[in-house]
Each structure stands twice: as C-alpha cells, then as structure tokens.
Amino acid sequence: MRYISTRGQAPALSFEEVVLTGMASDGGLYLPEEIPSLSRDDLAAMAGLSYAEIAFRVMKPFVNGEIDDDTFRAIVEEAYATFSHDAVVPLNQLDANHFLLELFHGPTLAFKDVALQLLGRILDHFLKKRGERAVIMGATSGDTGSAAIEGCRHCDNLDIFILHPHNRVSEVQRRQMTTVLADNVFNVAIEGNFDDAQAMVKASFADQSFLNGTRLVAVNSINWARIMAQIVYYVASAVALGAPHRPVSFCVPSANFGNVFAGYMAYRMGLPVERFVIATNANDILHRTLAANDFSKQELKATLAPSMDIVVSSNFERLLFEAYERDGAAVASLLERFQAEPTALADAPLARLREKFASHSVDDATILEVIREAHHRTQEILDPHTATGYRAAERERGDAAVPMITLATAHPAKFAEAVVKAGFPGVPLPPHMDDLLEREERYSVLPAELSAVQQFVVENRR
Ligand SMILES: *Cc1c(COP(=O)(O)O)cnc(C)c1O
C-alpha cells in the first residue's frame, strides 16, 4: 500500500513516511492509493469483539505490515487502555432510533484523544526504529492542545511544545495542559493572542533551520494516521447496531472535516452507511458548499462551540479528491481559485457529494435551545459541539427506519460555559479529573517573539 497526494504531484510514500511527513510537498494531503475493503463476512465477524481488536483489524491494511502485527496490536491496546470506559466509545440511546456515540472518555474528554493516543505511539515506534528524535510544535486556543500533550507524554523519542495565549485560556483547559509534568512536555504561554502563537508555529515549520536537522512533526488533523484511527469507531458502532445486516446513518459535528472524512472512508471500505449529516456551527463553509454550492471563505466567527470555529476545512480536500474522481490537477486548480476568490464545485462532483452527504448549520442561540431541549427529552447534558449534531441529525434524518448515530465529540464538563449559559448549574468533571484544580502546574511565559520561542525549543528539547 502506497499513499498518494490529492494534488497529484508529490511522490507516493509508505505508511511510515506518510505518518512522519504530514502535508505533501505539492501542498496536498495523502490518501491510500487503493482503499482496502471490509467484506460482509469481515464485518459480521467483528460482532462482540473488543474495541482494540476491531481497531487492529480495521487499521491493519493501512499499516501494511510496516509495524509487525504483535507490536501493532500492543500499541493499539495501550492507546485505548487510557480511556475510562470499558467500551472505549460507548453508544447511548436517545430515542427509538437515535444514538449518541460517546467519543469523550479519553484523557482530555474530547474525541481527538481517539486519534492522538494512537498517533503519539506510532510516531514513537517509528522514531525509535530509525534511531531518531523529533520535535512536535503546535498552537492552541485552549481546547485541543491537551489531546496532543496527552498523546505524547509517554513518548521517549518526542519532545512536544504547545503554545497557548497567556491568560486567554479557561482555567480548566489550561490545567489540562499544564498539569502534565512529563519531562518531554513543554507548555509555553505566549504574551499575545492565538494568532500570534499560530504564526510562530507556522514560521517554525516553514524554516526549520533553527533545529539543526532535527525533524519537526505536525500532529494536526491532516496527518493520515489520525484519519485512520477515526475510521474504527464508525465501524465499531455500526457493527454494534447490526452491520453488515442493516445500514446506519451518522451525524458529525464538523470543522476541519477529518472526523466525517474518516466515516466516508469506512463507507468506501464497505460499511453500509445510508447517509452522513454534516453539522456545522455558524462557521458554515461546509453547509454553504453542499447546500448552495457556495465554496467561499467568510470571516471567522467566535461561537459557543469553539473547536468548530474555522474558516477553511482542511480535510475537505480529501473528499474533493474523491468527488473529482481522483483528478489531482482538477483539485489543485479548484483550490487555487478558492484561495483567491469565492468559487463553486463543478456539477458532477457536487452531485456525487449530495448522494451521500446532507448538512445543517446551527447558530449559538440554537445551541443553547438544543442543550435545554435534549436534556428535557433524554436527561442528557450535551456539550455545545454535540448539540449542533443533535439538531442536524433531527433535521436531516432521512429514512426514519435507519438508525442515526450522532457523534458526541466532547464531554460537557469541558465546555461548561455554554452549559451554564443554557441555564444549568454546570457539569462536574469526571472522577478521574476531579482534583484538576489542585494539581501542580508547569509552564513558561514568553514574549510573542519568534526568536525567543525558537531559542526556548532548542534549549529544552532533549
Ligand atoms: C476538533 C473538534 C471537532 C471538529 O472535528 P473535525 O475533525 O475538525 O471536523 C468537533 N468537536 C470537537 C469537540 C472537536 O474538538
């Protein structure tokens, strides 16, 4: 199995290379050259298996023997042993045929743990094998940095530096990062805003000479291994509800499109999926594109579902590549036009997307209304991201006989602000985190200057 770029110009890579590389040299994203298939028998045989065993079986063809089976199985088991629920990603029934897939039982209470617990371990394995070390740099506005830190804290061959804007991150979110006291974890509070932090990370990737040859690795959602890890829960949840003997639908709170694209990969591998509903907040580029063929950037809006606040959905490029029947040149030219001005998809690719995808956009007032309504009807308190999914699933349900699985992407305690605004007294942290506010913290405050940050990285990496 080789991996090819969505823009058709970069060299094909092995699994190991693709995990270490991130973005392709032609600006595209990597995808498997051939999509492996899961037969009806393969799916039927997964009924009743543990999540780790299903994960091993689903991901094995993508890994392509580049990690031996015993080692890969051990990596997968270790990654999902960090989850606080035996089912790893339990299904929770909301009504006769609507289910929540709870993806928030990992160490940082959001679905990104599912991919990052695995990615850190896979990276560490390959680096160890090569006798190399690597540095990870990332910027966070607060909500997602902790998942990367938790994914790397046990990795001997990785040092991770996460920049957050000083005094502009909620206390719970800061502490989820700064109370990880591992030797290879460095939290940097930048005296500036999130854009300053992100600009310094981007500049460091663009010119890596300050690291004198040490590899800089990105663990953002364009890394193929993150998509691969997310395919698993689509398969596992559909099997739990009767796949391959009956189809299901999924509703996915979406931003960079990595999560729902993983679902689409599961479908292309052979999982019977009736439809995917894409839920967005007020940052609705995905909804505008699908519903009105308006593929254009709009100004960023700060919403109650901040992990979905985006202008551009980076992983949408992967779906465009499939919709344009893997014509890399057509994808490259569409995205070039998109960067410059509002544009539109060609008719045939748009029609292909509309066969499988529906969409719905949910504004902040509706998020609050949905949190109240869902609690009234089910006793569940939804986090604001999941609330967009709950509403979109109901509005775009399709055939009511097909089970609808809405992905619950975060625990409500992680986004308590919205829950309180909806009129609830708040949500307690789960038991394994209830001493978070008493734990020791460690972080360094630095000015918003590239040279200061890079000097800090060079002096502290091991
Ligand atoms: C990252 C995130 C999303 C969006 O997922 P994408 O893969 O970027 O579409 C939704 N909800 C939460 C809580 C997230 O952290």
Image: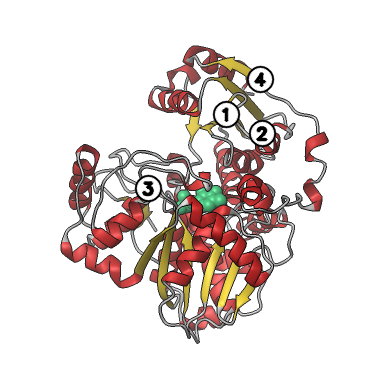
Q: Observer-nearest residue: 380 or 161?
A: 380
Q: Is residue 83 left or right of residue 370?
A: right
287 horizontally vs 305: left or right = left
Which residue is labeled 3 in the image? 313
Left or right of 324: which side holds 427?
right
Q: Which residue is at a point 58% across and 73% down the rendered structure image?
A: 99
Q: Is label 4 in contact with label 3 (beta carbons under 8 Å)?
A: no
Counting residues from the N terminus, which is met first, the one under dot 4 or under dot 2?
A: 2
Q: Label for residue 97?
A: none
Return the residue at label 2.
174
> Label 3 is placed on what type of residue?
Ser
Q: CA distance from mark 1 to mark 3?
A: 22 Å
Upstream in sequence: badge 3 or badge 2: 2
Task: Give the image location of residue 267, x and y in percent.
Answer: 41, 71
Q: Residues within 10 Å of mark 3 (few under 14, many from 20)?
A: some
**Judging from the image, what secondary structure is the residue with disc 4 in?**
strand
Front: mark 4 or 2? 2
Q: In what element is the residue under mark 1?
A: strand
CA distance separating discs 3 and 2: 26 Å
Measured in 3D between alpha carbons, the distance from the residue under mark 4 to the one under mark 3, in whole angstroms, is: 31 Å
Q: Is mark 3 within 8 Å of ligand 1?
A: yes
x, y (%) of residue 124? 60, 41
